[in-house]
Image (spheres, helix red, strand yellow):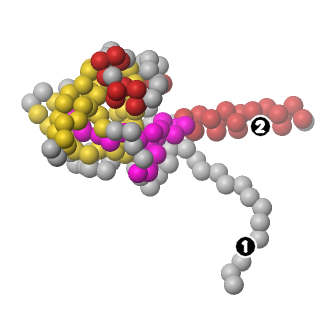
Amino acid sequence: MDRRLVQAAFFVAIAGMLTACAGGISRQALSQVTYSGAFSDVLKNPAGYQGQTVIWGGRVIKIENENGGTQIVALQQDLDGDYRPANSDQSQGRFLIRSSQFLDPVLYPPGTLFTVVGRLQGAENRLIGEMTYRYPVIDIVEIQRWDPQRRSSPRVHIGIGVSGRF
């Protein structure tokens, strides 16, 4: 009987882990990531990381469609354990995402949270107001949009306490 209980617990644990991995960035894309260091290091020296594949997250500032595809101007935000950007006001900077395919601005409006796996192509200087800013540029391998209200993995809360209204 104890053996069946242990087997059942094992299968429940495996199912939970698989559920937690559902959605988000594919394992194939994750296996291509060659640099997982600090975004700030790349920002200081984008040429030094050219050709590396990164996984970054953030929110859309602006999307620009051109004949050759789409560019997203993005605000970097740290990723959590599920590779989902932290929905906060903390950022280490901006970057550009390039896609050879059309990405619909309706699906990527300003403020959209995303995670992207992409290959670093160097940097591009652009203006923010009157200030020149150097943006690291990546070409998309895979991108995932996130619903800000929904988490990708189940939320579990276990607690003991007393509740009441006074």
Q: Which residues are magenta?
A: 71-89
Q: Is residue 157 above or below residue 37?
A: below
Residue located 27% across and 20% down the image: 121
Residue located 37% across and 45% down the image: 113
**Front: mark 1 or 2:** 1
Q: Quadrant of residue 70?
A: top left
Coordinates of residue 36 in the picture (x, y in percent):
47, 24
Q: Quadrant of residue 10?
A: top right
User: On the image, numbered disc 2 is attached to which residue?
Assistant: 9
Residue sitting at the far left:
67
Residue located 64% across and 51% down the image: 156
Coordinates of residue 84 in the picture (x, y in percent):
46, 40
Examine the rendering and report whether any part of residue 151 can be seen: yes
Foreground pick, 97 / 14: 97
* Main secondary structure of the magenta stretch: loop
Q: CA distance from mark 1 to mark 2?
A: 31 Å
Q: Does label 1 or label 2 sit earlier along the sequence? A: 2
Foreground pick, 29 / 51: 51
Is 98 a magenta residue? no
Residue sitting at the far right:
1
Is 76 a magenta residue? yes
The amino acid marked with disc number 2 is Ala
Neighbor class of circle 2 (other Cα within 10 Å; few <14, some 14-19, many 20+) is few
The amino acid marked with disc number 1 is Ser
Using the image, tell me which numbered label, if any, was put on residue 41: none
- SS of the residue at dot 1? loop
Q: In what quadrant of the picture does the C terminus appear?
A: bottom right
User: On the image, numbered disc 1 is attached to which residue?
Assistant: 163
Say whether marks 1 and 2 touch (CB < 8 Å).
no
Q: In what quadrant of the picture does the N terminus appear?
A: top right
Coordinates of residue 65 in the picture (x, y in percent):
14, 37
